[in-house]
Amino acid sequence: MRLRATGVQMLLLRNNWGMKRVLVTGGGGYLGSNLLPRLAAADWKVRAMGPYPPGPDAAPPVDVEWVTGSVLDETSLAEAMADCDAVVHLAARITLWRRDPAAWRLNTRGPALVAAEARRRGIRMVHCSSIHALDCSADGTITEATPLAGVERPLYDRSKAVGQRAVLAEVAKGLDAVICLPTGIIGPIDRGSRVNGLILAAARGRKVTVAGGFDWVDVRDVAAGITVALDWGRAGRSYLLSGARAQISTLMSLGAILAGRPPLRLAFPLEWVRPLAPLGEVVGSRLGTDVFTPAALGALADSPTVSNRRAREELGFLPRPLAMTVRDLLVSAEIDVSAGVGVGGR
């Protein structure tokens, strides 16, 4: 992703500011693991916060300070935010269940507490919301002006909308905040991502999926967009960080082809499988998977067209091609892509 600001402008800004400290909540997650080194490379002193100490496979960079605690614990949050100049709020739980009290509380109460603490301290906040906070069933192209998700939308969508409203309420009281709304995040390194799992399964031989699609964006480009927004985003402004719209079967076929396998030949129409989704939620609750639920299939049915024009014009956001993202995901999973090297580009 390129920056609109020149190197001289960035240098002058850093000389005026000096080294500043940023707290990243949810720093041990999928997006956090990509964001922490990006912020450190941009000359931020980085402190990461998560509910559990990171394991060996998820250890943050050596120059990142780790704090164990929950954003729902006001005391822990205040201690973690002490002497910070900014906070990036990532802590959230993606859920495709009809009921998920823990996800609802984290996604709604978490942003409210972080935003309130940031306002009290007079520091900048970047809130990582989601395109799902918007009504993805709305007609036309989804932009930052699209209404927030209403009561008829899935639980996750509603929870992200409530969290975003909480941040905006603090903005109205004087908080300096920027909101970033990524679309479907994919790419290296896989940390339990549902869609990454489908791509990797296709690269290993899976041949069947369902129809439907979404807008997909590389996790590294989202991390870059948030980093730029931290310095350059306009206060009170929101930015859609989108990539490219594609069918789920297309992503999986890319994975298969890059691994030297034939593309997928069968994608069941959504109208065939959606009546079975309530049963899939019951069965999935016993198996611990939410990949075949009404919310999961509903997201693919939305298949929104998304504009990232504001992020491109104000942040210089420029996402990479999907084929490159899929190739790098396979490489990170140690899957040989030499047979499909021409597909992923350079």
Image (cartoon, rainbow, N blue to C red):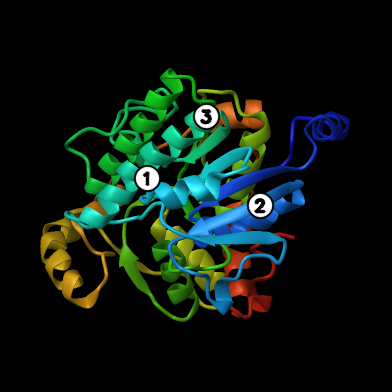
Q: Residue 27 appears at what percent x and percent y?
A: 53, 57
Answer few, some or many: residues within 10 Å of disc 3's Cα (few below 14, many 20 plus, some between 14 and 19).
many
Q: Which residue: 55% across, 71% down?
A: 257
Q: Mark 3 — residue?
A: 177
Tell whether 327 sits left or right of 246.
right
* In this view, the mark in front (2 or 3): 2
Answer few, some or many: residues within 10 Å of disc 1's Cα (few below 14, many 20 plus, some between 14 and 19).
many
Q: Residue 101 appears at what percent x and percent y?
A: 21, 54
Disc 1 marks a residue whose amino acid type is Gly
Q: Is residue 260 visible?
A: no
Q: How far is disc 2 from disc 3 in space, using C-alphas? A: 18 Å
Q: For the N terminus, give its image quadrant.
A: top right
Answer few, some or many: residues within 10 Å of disc 2's Cα (few below 14, many 20 plus, some between 14 and 19).
many
| Position above or below: 193 against 46 | below
| Position above or below: 239 against 40 | above
Tell whether 315 sits left or right of 152.
right
Disc 2 marks a residue whose amino acid type is Val
User: Which element is circle 3 on?
Assistant: strand
Q: Is residue 201 visible?
A: yes
Q: Mark 1 — residue?
A: 110
Residue 36 placement: quadrant: bottom right
Closer-to-camera residue (93/224): 93
Tell whether 279 sits left or right of 165.
left
As drawn, the label of residue 46 is 2
As drawn, the label of residue 244 is none
Q: Which residue: 68% across, 65% down?
A: 61
Closer-to-camera residue (295/235): 235
First-in-chain label (2 vs 3): 2
